[in-house]
Image (tube, rainbow, N blue to C red):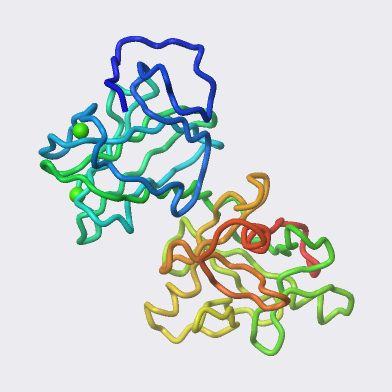
Amino acid sequence: MGKIIKSVAPSETSASQELSNQSLGYNYDIGSSIGSPVLYSDTCGAFDEHTPTCSSSQSSDHSYRWTAPAAGGYSFTTEGSSFDTILQLYDADGINPIACNDDSNGSTNSSVQAELSAGQTIVITVDGYGSNCGPFQLNIKGPRISSQPYAGRYWSFNTYAYTLLFMRHMNDLGYVSPISSSIDKLDATFKIVNGLADPQCLSFEARSHPGRFLRHFGYRLVLNSPDGSILFRQDATFCMKRGLADLSYLSFESYNYPGRYIRHRGNELWVEPGGGDPYAADATFKLVSPWSP
Ligand SMILES: [Ca+2]
Ligand SMILES: [Ca+2]
């Protein structure tokens, strides 16, 4: 990695290309990638090109240019990294700081959030506390979408990849299936309500059994009545995200197990982590008019 001269902003560098002209304040362009991780790398042997604003650091670092694919709140973490990282976000110029974090969630991993507009470009720097360097992973999650505009109404949920399959419950378990009978239609209709554990997220209340909600239990999606516990409220709360397979659609992330999304595996609904295909498609749904209005 060469030394970065931060004051020059040439425009000839194409996206997604390792920079030969390292004068933009970053080392790599990673486009609009989202994932856990987006990449693995190692800061040992790199140059010390940035100094974080939030903690003591004289360490080598890697910087990435990244562009938000849609408006919303994004989360950037080094969760899973094996050395004491510091994460710093800058404006597109690589100079003006947006956010910085050293340690989070009781670990030396770092976590920052930023509210970004569609197409907004930032620079993400992975640095080390003190003089630490080492292997790291960079995770980019988001954006969360408020469920408020959808709450209080009935909806059905079409799978992204299979136009004939819809989310439903059957014998108190979550499935996807084709819909034809009136019972199918009832069981494939849910009211989106404010999340039982967080009103910015949502819960799925059964049309056929008001007061019963989809929740995960052993990571399987089941239909249960609240038992008064905090655990139930958390297990029955999901946060709406832009679709993992297509930003036009939606994915539903577990409130208490971030990184696990509602997905269909065969015709069963589970709450699982994953990436790539077919996971992303199986974890993406289209909100449609309710089968049973
Ligand atoms: Ca540094
Ligand atoms: Ca740290």
**In the image: residue 159, left or right of residue 213:** right
The percent position of residue 65, horizontal first and vertical second, equals: 42, 30
Where 223 falls versus 293 (above or below)? below
Q: Quadrant of residue 223?
A: bottom right
Q: Nearer the viewer, residue 120 or 211?
A: 120
The percent position of residue 37, horizontal first and vertical second, equals: 44, 52
Quadrant for the N terminus in the image: top left
Residue 198 appearing in the image: yes
**In the image: residue 76, left or right of residue 215:** left
Q: Nearer the viewer, residue 216 or 263?
A: 263
The percent position of residue 266, horizontal first and vertical second, equals: 71, 75
Quadrant for the C terminus in the image: bottom right
Where 10 falls versus 16 (above or below)? above
Going 71% across and 63% down the picture, which residue do you hit?
A: 157
Where 240 falls versus 31 (above or below)? below
**In the image: residue 40, left or right of residue 60:** right
Going 56% across and 80% down the picture, which residue do you hit?
A: 220
Going 48% across and 35% down the picture, which residue do you hit?
A: 30
Going 77% across and 76% down the picture, which residue do you hit?
A: 186
